[in-house]
Image (spheres, rainbow, N blue to C red):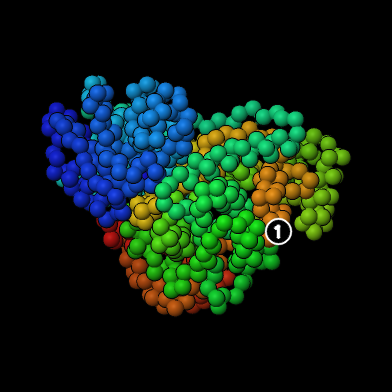
Amino acid sequence: MSAITGIYTFNRTVPIEQGKSILKNLQRYYADSSSFWCKDSVFLGSHTRWITPESVGEALPYYDEEKQLVIAADCILDNREELVHILQLRKSDRSRLSDSQIILEAYQKWGKETPMHLLGDFAFIIWDEKKKQLFGARDFSGSRTLYFHKTHEQIAFCTTINPLLDLPMVKKSLNEEWLAEFLAIPGMNDAVDSESTVYKSVKQIPPSHSFSVVNGEIKLAQYSHITFPSPLILKSSEEYVEAFQDVFERAVHDRIRTHHQVGSFLSGGLDSGSVVSFAARELKRKEKPLYTFSSIPLHDFEDWTPRHRMADERPFIQSTIDYVGNIKGHYLDCQGQNSFTEIDEWLDIMEMPYKFFENSFWLKGAYERARQAKVGVLLNGARGNFTVSWGITFEYYAQLLKKMKWVQLYKELFQYSRNMQVPRSRVMKVVGKKAFPMVRHIFGKEQEDSSFPFINPDFAKKTDVFNKLRAYGMDIDENNVLNRDSIRIQHFQQLFSWNTTGTVDTKLSLNYGLQGRDPTNDLRVIQYCLSVPSKQYAQNGLDRALIRNAMENYLPDKVRLNQRVRGIQAADIIHRMLPDWKQFVSQVEEMNKDQYIFYFINKATFENALATLSQNPSVTYAFSEEFKILMRSLIVYRFIKRFL
């Protein structure tokens, strides 16, 4: 894991002081070594943290004099064993070669097709002296960031943004198109343009892309496209489970390769529980424990959430810890921390506005505790909802209804209603709406959204943001009824879906000197899960049936078969802020006097939210639209005031 940089000048010697300036800027991050390579028109630098056993003592950038290739890489390869076999590397070399050196060997064999053969989290830059060409890539899901700034004289790259902004002649001007997308997208995505950033002068290599710089021009090429394969046909559900366990076990195994301790997020659910179960078993063979980190509410919080949600997941979490074994569990109440007081620190970490304020305090708290425990790899199951625990229960039942498979539908509805302890008539009503959505659309009264948009309508019109979002397949008007399969397809085929998680993971890893890794985001796992037929995800009344069946004897039935209660993190977000509530209201009221921010944000929407919450800080507003508007507005406002 590294923060890397590179400068390539056109028709002049590279200004070495600029490269050194970037490396000096990167000194804020944890590292085991920091060095650079410079020759003629090229400067490469690396601020390196040794995570894997093979990386210990690694000198980056690495120069291969025989091949006349030099590389700066921020990488952990997950198909290392396959690569050393395909590349026919000597057995004596296999244990001593770092992942970056293996990438150079791959480049020597495959050239620009190299990224297609790599699995893992990576961003790298290679200077090919023979071809006088700069080449690099970012992994398929953008797990590691790589930004760049280009002029007619040079192009400069860096893992983070701020070092590029400190270069001569670089302007800190706001990218209004990016901010318009940030404000107009209601969900957690930042922007649909996966190459843009919040600054006009800085762009980024998109996920799944390689780049080459030739004759003063940068050329981007998408090397990876996730497609939905034909359904995998196996003989029985047991075979689907066994095949899943094989690919998932390999994904977990490859991600715990570190000479440090291994940690993992752990909630009371299936995704993180499955990751933890496989990781703890594998680590037991290595005689190492697994450290887990779980978010819990403050001790005086009273759970106001509905009966089917659970703010304190400790009963399920502890059940997993006790059943799996070889786990050192840590419960984090993050006393004294809240989403409001953490804003400035998060802006420093992210270098940009962010949306995930609800989870910000415990996410940072988990990384802090993991660092204290000397963890090098921190596992999570963030992509699980779209891969290992994909659930299309009602959609599958709707398919049975439309195909008139009455017997099979009756059996499924009977079992599902018994599991959930709800009448079959209620379940059938939902299935009917899924099967025939146009009936509801034509004859049912649609609820109109009376709220104002978050973005200033004039700013939206100026940037034409809504048409741009629709061009990327976003249904901002919510006129269309998208089924979950369509949502899943969009998630994997739109590159912007990857950028948010990759940016957060990279910035947190640098800030805390450890790397977040997600086995549910493994490309092999993704491809397998996309090939599994629908009926394997919904059977015998179980939603997310594949993972539930696969986790038999891996997770306790209390967790594995739980369909009635789901955890909900950060339900105490306003409760935590109560000691700082007056200061929070004071700041948003002060912000209300600054007309500049309302060039971007809808003033009517903001003032409506302020009127609702300023005098009534009810904890039940934790996930309300009004609270979200005030917090996101304040985050954007603070960013503009501090960084521009």
Q: Residues within 10 Å of mark 1 (few under 14, many from 20)?
A: few
- Figure label count: 1
* 445 horizontally vs 52: left or right: right
Residue name at image x 57 percent, y 70 percent: 620
Residue name at image x 54 percent, y 62 percent: 329
Residue name at image x 57 percent, y 34 percent: 527
Residue 80 at what x, y percent from top left?
Answer: 44, 33
Q: Is residue 218 visible?
A: no
Tell me the SS state at disc 1: helix
Please, which residue is most extreme toward the right here?
Answer: 407
Q: Nearer the viewer, residue 591 or 252?
A: 252
Residue 550 at what x, y percent from top left?
Answer: 68, 44
Residue 252 at what x, y percent from top left?
Answer: 54, 44
Q: Is residue 60 visible?
A: yes
In the rendered image, the vertical position of residue 420 relative to residue 102, given as above or below:
below
Q: Quadrant where the N terminus lies?
A: top left
Residue name at image x 50 percent, y 50 percent: 379
In the rendered image, the vertical position of residue 338 relative to residue 288, given as above or below:
below
In the rendered image, the vertical position of residue 329 relative to residue 406, given as above or below:
below
Q: Quadrant where the C terminus lies?
A: bottom left
Q: Nearer the viewer, residue 635 or 335?
A: 335
Residue 162 at what x, y percent from top left?
Answer: 27, 50
Type of residue at label 1?
Answer: Lys
Q: Nearer the viewer, residue 226 or 423?
A: 226
**Figure quadrant of residue 455:** bottom left
Residue ID for mark 1: 558
